[in-house]
Amino acid sequence: MGAHRELHTALLDLEATLKAADLWRMPIPETAAFSSQQPFCVDTMSLLQWLRFVFIARLESLVEACGPMPAKCEVAPAVAAYLQQEQTPAHHQLLVVRAVERVDKVVTEN
């Protein structure tokens, strides 16, 4: 399987996992929130908003354009910390973090 196709599959899995954990539905951040210069847009949106509206969206655009993969992707540790802080049920934490780890791996290894 090609890298872009593998990433597309991993992103679909992440989306499905977030939906199953009831972590997908949320308000769209204000337009100005996307201009943040901070990692994960921490000053303008929640990590889950960033994951959905920035991370997944940008990687989907990369897949569609068959663009070059970033050199490294290490989002899973931040997601794990955030979900634990938010007291997300442990089984949802595990599934979501595993899905993000898969995306991280696909990006970093390609």
Image (cartoon, rainbow, N blue to C red):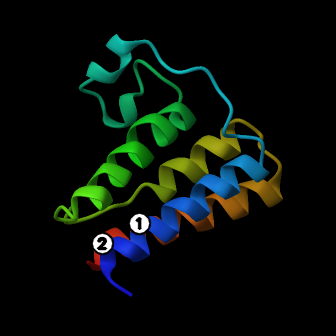
Relative to residue 102, is residue 64 drawn left or right?
Answer: left
**Residue at position x 81%, y 60% from top?**
91
Relative to residue 108, is residue 43 drawn left or right?
Answer: right
Q: Position of residue 35 (x, y in %)?
A: 26, 20
Q: Which label is found at residue 85?
A: none
Which element is circle 1 on?
helix
Location of the N terminus (image quadrant): bottom left
Relative to residue 90, is residue 7 drawn left or right?
Answer: left
Q: Position of residue 47 (x, y in %)?
A: 52, 35
Up-down relation of residue 18 to residue 74 (above or below): above
The amino acid marked with disc number 2 is: Thr
Q: Which label is found at residue 108?
A: 2
Q: Nearer the viewer, residue 108 or 56?
A: 56
**Residue at position x 37%, y 53% from top?**
60
Tags 1 and 2 touching, CB below 8 Å: yes
Q: Quadrant of residue 65?
A: bottom left
